[in-house]
């Protein structure tokens, strides 16, 4: 059941990336976020109830709520046309929690793929903080990051897990490289964003001087 929620999270993040590109209506995407958000709150609650109640089991299942509440927050914000500052500061909190999950995944569970995945999510949530709380105009950049992550951290891993091959050594090794390549892509996009911002500032300075 958790894999199904992960699969639908991929769909929600994909639609959010398209919205950030300006290709989809925010309100309509918001309703889908609400749908997935409700599921991502109900599913972990159910899984926790039927679990073995071990603290590490609950620790792992509780992380799903981070996604569920994010999607609910995005949905409510978009549907009602609210200011994104509340969502932005919530994203900052989740980003910090995601870093902790990345550390635990690596040190406690020796899960390199899991650790890299949590690091990627932490970065994306931090970008939502920059956009929503600090009003940074980087929607297209965030859209690029969200688009890639919707596939490499959610959709494809969920499909591979549903097929029963996610934990195999070959897939784990392959996905480590997939995630590292995606990080390189994010770095390239960041460099392009900085260069574009610098050129824009230079043009404004020239216009002001003239």
Image: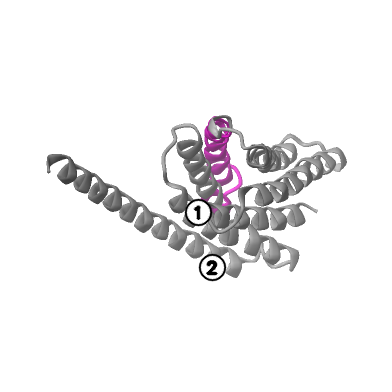
User: Which disc number belongs to residue 174?
Assistant: 2
Q: Could you say which is closer to the camera, residue 117 or residue 140? A: 140
Tell me if residue 143 comes above or below residue 207 in the rendering. below
User: Which disc number belongs to residue 143?
Assistant: 1
Q: Say few, some or many: other residues with alpha carbon within 10 Å of mark 1 (under 14 / 14 to 19 / 20 or more).
A: many
The reply, left or right, for residue 5 in relation to residue 85 is right
Q: Residue furthest right?
A: 50
Colour scheme of the rendered structure: one colour
Residue 63 sits inside the magenta stretch: no
Disc 1/disc 2 C-alpha distance (Å): 25 Å
Q: Secondary structure at mark 1?
A: helix
Q: Residue 149: x, y in percent?
A: 55, 56
The reply, left or right, for residue 149 in relation to residue 141 is right
Image quadrant in which the C terminus is located: top left
- Residue 14, located in which quarter of the rendered image? bottom right
Q: Residue 105: x, y in percent?
A: 58, 45
The reply, left or right, for residue 60 in relation to residue 178 is right
Q: Residue furthest front?
A: 210
Q: Residue furthest left?
A: 210
- Residue 155, located in which quarter of the rendered image? bottom right
Q: Which residues are magenta?
A: 87-116
Q: Secondary structure at mark 2?
A: helix
Q: Residue 83: x, y in percent?
A: 56, 32
What's the residue at 73%, 34% (across, down)? 55
What's the residue at 74%, 52% (across, down)? 5
What's the residue at 47%, 39% (across, down)? 131
Image quadrant in which the N terminus is located: bottom right
Magenta-drawn stretch, dominant element (helix, strand or loop): helix
| Between discs 1 and 2, the one toward the N terminus | 1
Q: Residue 150: x, y in percent?
A: 59, 57
């Amino acid at each position: 059941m958790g894999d199904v929620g992960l699969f639908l999270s991929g769909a929600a993040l994909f639609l959010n990336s398209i919205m950030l590109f300006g290709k989809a209506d925010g309100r309509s995407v918001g309703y889908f976020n609400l749908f997935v958000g409700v599921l991502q709150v109900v599913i972990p609650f159910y899984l926790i109830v039927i679990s073995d109640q071990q603290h590490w089991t609950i620790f792992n299942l509780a992380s799903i709520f981070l996604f569920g509440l994010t999607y609910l927050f995005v949905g409510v914000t978009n549907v009602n046309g609210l200011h994104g500052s509340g969502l932005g500061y919530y994203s900052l909190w989740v980003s910090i929690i995601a870093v902790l999950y990345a550390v635990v995944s690596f040190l406690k569970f020796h899960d390199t793929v899991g650790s890299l995945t949590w690091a990627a999510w932490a970065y994306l949530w931090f970008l939502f903080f920059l956009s929503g709380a600090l009003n940074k105009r980087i929607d297209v950049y965030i859209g690029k990051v969200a688009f890639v992550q919707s596939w490499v951290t959610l959709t494809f891993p969920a499909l591979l897990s549903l097929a029963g091959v996610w934990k195999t050594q070959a897939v784990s090794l392959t996905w480590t490289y997939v995630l590292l390549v995606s990080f390189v892509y994010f770095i390239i996009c960041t460099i392009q964003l900085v260069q574009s911002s610098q050129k824009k500032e230079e043009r404004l300075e020239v216009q002001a001087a003239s």
